Image (tube, rainbow, N blue to C red):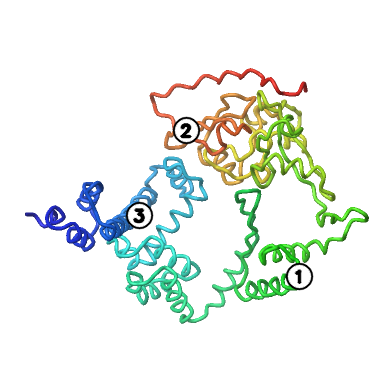
Amino acid sequence: MPEHLGWLCGPMTERLEWLLEQVPSSDTQVALEAMEHEPMSPKERMLYAAAWDRQRSAVAARAMSAQVRATLPGAAGPYANPDVIDGELAGVLRRTDGSMAYQLAFARRLIEALPLTFKLLDAGDVSLEHARAIEQLTAALTVEQAQLVDGSVADRASTTTVSAFRRIVRQAVAALDVDTERETQAKRTAGVRLLPEPDGMCTVAVRMPATDGVATIEALNVRADRLKTPDDQRTHGMRQVDAFLDALFGEPVPAAGTGKVRSRRRTEVQVTIDWASLLGLRDNPAELAGYGPVAAESVRAMLDEEGTTLRRLVYEPVTGVLLDYARTRYRPDDHMRGLVAARDVTCRYPGCCRNAIWCDSEHCDDYAGGGATSCANCGLMCRRHHNRKTHEGYRYRRVDPATGETVWTTPLGFTYRQRAATYSPSGADTGDTIRETATDRPDPPPPRPDPPPDDPPF
């Protein structure tokens, strides 16, 4: 019997152990798929899962190789700009440009600077998580320095957990000579980011030098401990957040005769919500500018929150479309920009989910050529995609000027349709992107639904 068919004979445990010794290939995948429905003991199910994990590692390595080859210089013919080439691949794979850039940077770094780890990944001997760990921990090193670390630690990855491997890599990095220029460059990446999370929560991520980070956490823990009272029902994490807010906004002061506390914040918040949900007749999600979808109840609660100015953009629930607002000057004024941001929700480039409030105003039909400064002709794009549309041969047309639905054509000839943004829970998401083929025909505009019977008469 051919060696590559060794999985066909013998007890299941022996067949699986044999598979675990093979380099993942199309043959091993066929074997795993054929064995899926065969009877297995609990132990054999564990071995079967391990064999699939090896297959997953090898497939990930080969997918990365294919992506890197697809974006080599010259891969896009006359379009030599690497950003254009990477953007074409992002569209085909339905990735955002940021996600694609991260994915390609990881693949290129692994192949170029960490070749031993990549070889182990391709052979199924280490997991994708091991590869990500060493790539992240050596990201600030030069290629030569990363190769030194790779050579000293790669063989440990196949026998350690990811956490243990991270410690080993950190030790190898710390053993290198300190590069003050590298540390200076790393400090330039410091900053603060807001990361939306479920249930109306978010994470404020701060990137800073390690020594400052340790000192910050220590100070927050000390302050959080001081806030604890005998009958305190808050968790330590909740007290950490309160200590953090106190440091930024000052400690809250009890409101006279109410037992409540005045808000520590003095800010303006913009939300977009339909009339029925604002009045409490429905609970359709609202859109909080700079964050994303939030529960309608959270918006209604803001109305009573002292110290916060709530700027509401209320849309009609049947059409979901805001009224046009035209101006004769080039730059949209603040009111028009607010309407367009509420309509578009995010950048109008296919698949991009960058919040509209951080985007540039942009004319579909060029202003110099007679294009109007109106909601129908203006949209919002992040700076990267605004430049791509202006300088790199990307173009788009508006299918329905009232809603902002767009159809894009790339330099390589791919065509993508981005649906109009909607605030309906069952409607299209701003990230929904459809790649059209030569046989596709433009979809007719959807019929407008009948007004719901419980809508208020506004």
Q: Secondary structure at mark 3?
A: helix
Q: Nearer the viewer, residue 86 or 433?
A: 433
- x and y percentages locating residue 453 in the rendered image: 69, 20
- x and y percentages locating residue 286 in the rendered image: 68, 38
Q: Nearer the viewer, residue 72 or 160?
A: 160
- x and y percentages locating residue 39 in the rendered image: 22, 50
Q: Mark 2 — residue?
A: 434
Q: Mark 1 — residue?
A: 230
The amino acid on which the numbered mark 3 sits, given as a three-letter code, is: Ala
Quadrant for the N terminus in the image: bottom left
- x and y percentages locating residue 428 in the rendered image: 55, 32
Query: Residue at the location (77% across, 21% down)?
Result: 457
The amino acid on which the numbered mark 1 sits, given as a three-letter code, is: Pro
Occupied quadrant, residue 436: top left
Q: Mark 3 — residue?
A: 60
Q: Earlier in the sequence, mark 2 or mark 3?
A: 3
Query: Residue at the location (39% across, 43% down)?
Result: 76
Q: Which numbered mark, 2 or 1, is in the foreground of this view? A: 1
Q: Earlier in the sequence, mark 2 or mark 1?
A: 1
Residue 27, numbered circle: none
